[in-house]
């Protein structure tokens, strides 16, 4: 299965985003951010790539200040 990683610079926003995904029924994992990304709080959210649209919509609506990218 293909997946994407959503990266934030703040741990609290990473966890908040994960909780919102839970509310939408989107499967996710909290993972250690890969070292090559080197721009986060140390943890990121991993979701199936076919759920990207939902993730992007949440990001647009919530305007997370520490959002660093989707990889």
Image: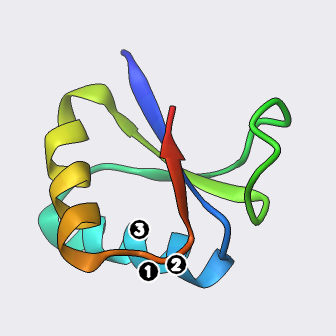
Mark 3 residue crowding within 10 angstroms, few (<14) / some (14–19) / many (20+): many
Q: Are marks 3 and 1 in contact (CB under 8 Å)?
A: yes
Residue 28: percent from left, percent from top: 40, 50
Q: From the top left corner, tell me how far across and down residue 42 is, in percent.
A: 79, 59
Residue situated in front as seen by the camera: 20 or 58: 58
- Work out whether 23 lies above or below 41: below
Give the residue drawn at x 75%, y 37%: 37
The percent coordinates of residue 47 (x first, y second) are: 38, 41
Query: What residue is disc 3 on?
Result: 18
Q: Which residue is mark 1?
A: 16
* Distance from the alpha carbon under mark 3 to that under mark 1: 5 Å
Q: Is residue 37 left or right of residue 15?
A: right
Q: Quadrant of residue 16?
A: bottom left
Residue 18: % across, % down? 41, 68
Contact check, label 2 and label 1, Cβ < 8 Å: yes
Is residue 38 something that shows in the picture? Answer: yes
The total number of labels drawn is: 3
Label 2, secondary structure: give it: helix
Helix, strand, or loop for circle 1?
helix
Q: CA distance from mark 2 to mark 1?
A: 5 Å
Q: Quadrant of the N terminus?
A: top left
Quarter of the figure with residue 41 = bottom right
Cα–Cα gap, marks 2 and 3: 8 Å
The residue that disc 2 covers is 13
2 or 3: mark nearer the eye: 2
Mark 2, Cα crowd under 10 Å, few <14 / some 14-19 / many 20+, is some
Q: Is residue 24 above or below residue 7?
A: below
Q: Earlier in the sequence, mark 2 or mark 3?
A: 2
Position above or below: 70 against 21: above
User: Is label 3 in a helix, a strand or a loop?
Assistant: helix
Q: Tell me: 31 left or right of 51.
A: right
């Amino acid at each position: 299965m293909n997946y994407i990683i959503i990266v934030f610079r703040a741990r609290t926003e990473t966890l908040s985003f994960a909780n919102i995904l839970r509310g939408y029924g989107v499967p996710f994992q909290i993972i250690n951010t890969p070292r090559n990304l080197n721009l986060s709080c140390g943890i990121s959210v991993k979701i199936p790539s076919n759920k990207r649209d939902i993730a992007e919509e949440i990001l647009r609506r919530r305007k997370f200040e520490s959002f660093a990218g989707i990889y």
